[in-house]
Image (spheres, rainbow, N blue to C red):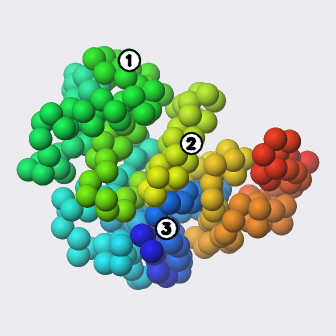
Amino acid sequence: MLLEARALRFARRDRSILDGVSLAVEAGELLVVIGPNGAGKSTLLHLLSGALAPADGEVAFDGQPLGTWPRAALARRRAVLPQSSELSFPFRAVEVVLMGRSAHAGTSSQAHDREVVRQALEAVDAQHLAERVYPTLSGGERQRVQLARVLAQIWPHGGEARLLLLDEPTNNLDLSHQHQLLRFARRLADREVGVLAVLHDPNLAALYADRLAVLAEGHILSEGPVAEVLTEETVGRAFGLDVAVRPHPLSGTPQLFTI
């Protein structure tokens, strides 16, 4: 198992945020976590990335407790795209993406790093932004540059399994680029990258995910293949919403419709 969380518990100011959450991600799959606001989705991602430490439970990456990994070695194989990335200095977009290569210092040449950056920008349809000054970009353009940065960080290295954690990556993106980003995440999973994404939109998640996990009130309410998880009963319990679930007319993937 590439990433495994076992019985995670986390509280803030004596309020339980997560209570006994277990989750796993394999190389080559896209797992999407959905749930209502305040369910603990971002907190879970912070625990999975190591940005927060659980009060109880454990996170393991590639069979080894997360806390025992050397930081540079972990960074070469696991990258995190946060909800927002503030940067006020007038760096060019290409320089921001190059920051993703810092974990490879001493293991990669400058020429190789520049080639990785070029390919990462091209992969997310942001090559035309390379020379633009980052703070002048729109929110959606910044998100695409940041995605290129984390992609450059875990660019194939030594044939080792890699993991990408995405915290609401479609924020600030228009409809076209939302789908473009998730198609890209899908392609990464098809190339044996483990991808975990936190999303707000269940229908968007269902179109691209291998598995869904529904988080509600600090617990995993349901987890498994999309068709088994995205049900009227589960959505009603998690979101307090009456819905009908019908197959997508082209893909057959379950889609929600409010009643």
User: Toward which corner of the image does residue 134 lie, by quadrant?
Assistant: top left
- Rendering coords of residue 2 (x, y %): 42, 70
Residue bearing mark 1: 128
Disc 2 crowd rating (10 Å Cα; few below 14, some 14-19, many 20+) is: many
- Quick one: 117 or 58, which is closer to the camera? 117
Q: Is residue 214 above or below residue 252?
A: below
Asked whether, in this view, residue 171 is left or right of residue 67, the answer is: right
Between discs 2 and 3, the one toward the N terminus: 3
Q: Which residue lies at the image location 30% right of the left edge and 29% below the top edge?
A: 118
Q: In what element is the residue under mark 1? A: helix
Residue bearing mark 2: 182
User: Toward which corner of the image does residue 11 lie, by quadrant?
Assistant: bottom left
Q: Which residue lies at the image location 22% right of the left edge and 25% below the top edge?
A: 91
Q: Which residue lies at the image location 40% right of the left edge and 47% below the top edge?
A: 82
Q: Quadrant of the N terminus?
A: bottom left
Asked whether, in this view, residue 252 is left or right of residue 113, the answer is: right
